[in-house]
Image: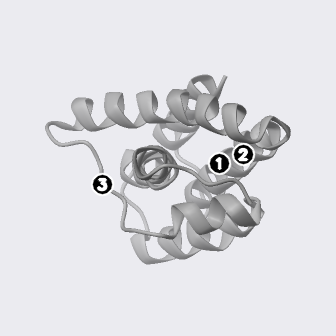
Amino acid sequence: MTAYTEAEGQTLRTAVFGAMVLVSTADPGALDAESHAGVRAMSLLPEDLRAVIGAAPPVLPAGSAADVEAGVLAALRSSVGIVGAREPGEVAVFRSAVVEMCRSVAGADGDVAAAEREMVSKVVEALG
C-alpha cells in the first residue's frame, strides 16, 4: 500500500466526495438515496484509495456554489496527478470509479436531470 500524505489524502477526499456533492446538488432530488448510491459506488475504488479517502472527513471548498465547484474540479484535476505519482496503474481505475460514483448519484432517484448530466460531464473533463 502506498502511503499518501495528509495533504494528498485531503485533496483526494475533496475530489471524491466533492464530485458526488456537485452532482447531487445540481438538481434537487432524493438526497438520502443519492448519498447511499455514491457511498456504495466507492467500493469501485482500489482498497488503498478507499482507506485514504475514508481516513478523515472531507473538507469542501468554502464560498459560493461557483467557488465550491471550482475548488472541487481543481481537486479532481490534482487527484489524478497524485494517484499517478503514487500508483500510476490505478489512475484509470480511479477515474472510472469517480465517474461511476457520480453517475450512481445522478441516477439514484430513477431520473437523471440535464443539470446532473452537465455536472457529470464537468467531472469527466476535470479527470482528464
In the current view of this chain or complex, which residue is farthest to the left? 63
Kind of residue at badge 2: Phe
The quarter in which the C terminus is drawn is: top right
Along the polypeptide, which appears first: circle 3 or circle 2? 3
Q: Residue at x 40, y 70 (%)?
A: 31
Residue corresponding to mark 1: 98
Q: Residue at x 37, y 59 (%)?
A: 58
Q: Horizontal and vertical percent for residue 8?
A: 48, 44
Q: Is residue 28 left or right of residue 116?
A: left
Residue 37, placed above or below residue 5? below
Residue corresponding to mark 2: 94
Residue corresponding to mark 3: 59
Q: What element carries label 3?
A: loop
Q: Horizontal and vertical percent for residue 66?
A: 25, 30
Q: Which residue is drawn at 66% across and 39% down?
A: 83
Tags 3 and 2 touching, CB below 8 Å: no
Badge 1 density bin: few <14, some 14–19, many ≥20, Cα 10 Å: many
Q: Is residue 93 left or right of residue 80?
A: right
Tags 2 and 1 touching, CB below 8 Å: yes
Residue 112, placed above or below residue 118? below
